[in-house]
Amino acid sequence: MCRNMQKDILRSIPSVNELLESPEISKLTGIYPRQLVVDAIRAVLEDIRQSLTNEKGMSRFDSNQKSLPCEGGVKKIVEAQAIDLSPQKLYHRVQQSLQQKFCGIEHAINATGIILHTGLGRTPLTDEAANQIQNILKSFCTLEIEKLTGRRGIRYHHIEQLVSMITGAESALVVNNNAAAVLLALDTLARGKEVIISRSQLVEIGGSFRMPDVMSKGGAILVEVGTTNKTYLDDYRNAITEHTGLILKVHQSNFKIVGFTETVVLKDLVSLGKERNIPVMYDLGSGALIDLEKFGLPHEPTVQESIKAGVDIVTFSTDKLMGGPQGGIIAGKKKWVDLLKKNPLTRALRVGKLTIAALEATLKLYLEEDLAIKKIPALTMIFAPLEAIEERCKRLISNVTPETKAFMSISTVDGLSEMGGGSLPGEGIPTKLISLYSEKIPAEELAARLRGNTPPIFARIEQGRVLLDMRTVYDDEVDTIVAALEKIFSQGKVN
């Protein structure tokens, strides 16, 4: 870039006060503290100045600008840069800078098709759970008190009753997530003792937390048996010593091993445990309380199956397939659960009243399976018929104005949704998607603008198209997506 051109463009950069007093950016001072808006403007302008001092500067703040020779094209470039540096254009950059600093939790539209999207908070709660939280949010509640006697009670009592009724477990305990449940069980039952586990089950869960590390933190001594693809009952039997404290089975909920494989079923491990007087624990992970196979989906082991097999302890998440708030449940034989309740770690890992309220409301729905399927968002999304999803797509397309359609190609295409959340790995659920393509706005930029909407809309990009999976979009969010597209493709916003 020639020196004179750099100077001309630098002179076209507006001042902080000029931007601050502009109708567009001045609105931000009503949302954020004035000084923070000033700081954000300064940061954006400094970034532009820095970008202009290097060879790639032109493209850094305007992805549509092509590099042109200095001779003969200076005037056009300066005019283009002047438009790009207007308050209308810089508003989005200043807003983005502020949003990054004040990036709190807000409502979002999940059009990714990932039902249990960890980044988007996994599944929404039921209306019943939300109402129960609201009921106790601004008042006192019977968290740890007996209503009839007025005596101090146990906060887990109602959860324990519900879990026992639904699963057949003798006892139960709730902690803040499944990793905590596993940690508490290992610390209680196997600290300083050997824990036998198949090599194929040394999984890594979200956030790079690995089962061997959790076992080590729980004070257990890891004893691996079998191979990556094959483990037999004799492998467990031959590994038992006088120092063995626990036999552990971990459900491979977030990956698959296929082909030449062999694994030991839970019932056989339970028999071995009884034979050698060693407790058997099953880390189930996803926490399914409904047999998905009945509805045409691949089999996912349920908590009820584990309890029926006679396992001593089973741990599972409450915010995955169960569809409740974040938490982890430990269920099983009373003699073992009682030991966990007495562990001081239980106090550190316990959940608060809001979690308990939401979890109770969610579990009550499972007393009637049909009611759970109808009311729990994760289940309604999983079992949503293609016809309903396609109807959602048609409504979205029909509501987009002809003026907006002139700037983009919009259509319905077939696709696959994902379970997510470490459940049913590799299994896709047939779905219908909205495909968006525009020659005016690249797919990456269009997806970014959708995320910049209020509320943010999260989609996916494939082969240069933005795809909106309508399986995970609520009916009342369709109009919000339409409004966002109208805003993005309105006159003056498309270059």
Image (cartoon, rainbow, N blue to C red):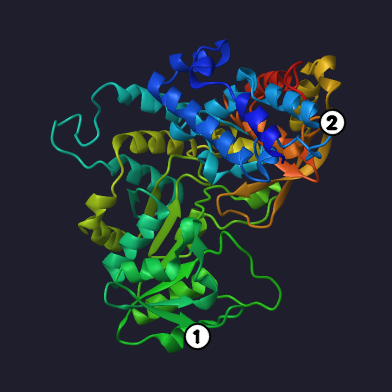
Task: From this view, report whether residue 249 is shown above or below residue 296.
Answer: below
From this viewpoint, is residue 327 visible? yes
In front: label 2 or label 1 = 2
Task: From this view, report whether residue 116 is shown above or below residue 448.
Answer: below
Q: Name the residue under label 1.
A: 235
The residue positioned farthest toward the front in the image shown:
4
Q: In this view, does 332 lie to the left or right of 304?
A: left
Q: In which quarter of the image is the N terminus?
A: top right
Q: In which quarter of the image is the C terminus?
A: top right
**Of the residues under marks 2 and 1, which one precedes in the sequence?**
1
- Residue 109 in the image: state x and y as whole percent: 60, 30
Q: Which residue is drawn at 56% across and 10% down?
A: 23
Residue nearer the viewer, 75 or 318? 75
Check disc 1 and give the amino acid type.
Asp
Task: From this view, report whether residue 245 is shown above or below residue 493.
Answer: below
From this viewpoint, is residue 473 visible? no
- Residue 306 in the image: state x and y as whole percent: 48, 60
Q: Residue at x 65, y 77 (%)?
A: 261
Q: Is mark 2 on a helix, strand or loop?
A: strand
Residue nearer the viewer, 436 or 142? 436
Q: Do the residues labelled 2 and 1 touch (CB within 8 Å)?
A: no
Decide: few, some or many residues near mark 1? Use Cα within 10 Å; few <14, some 14-19, many ≥20: some
Q: Is mark 1 on a helix, strand or loop?
A: helix
Q: Which residue is drawn at 68% across and 46% down?
A: 55
Check disc 2 and give the amino acid type.
Ser
- Residue 284 in the image: state x and y as whole percent: 48, 59
Decide: few, some or many residues near mark 2? Use Cα within 10 Å; few <14, some 14-19, many ≥20: some
Q: Residue at x 32, y 40 (%)?
A: 158
Quadrant of the rendered image containing residue 457: top right
Q: In this view, does 207 lie to the left or right of 217?
A: right
Q: Mark 2 points at which residue?
A: 411
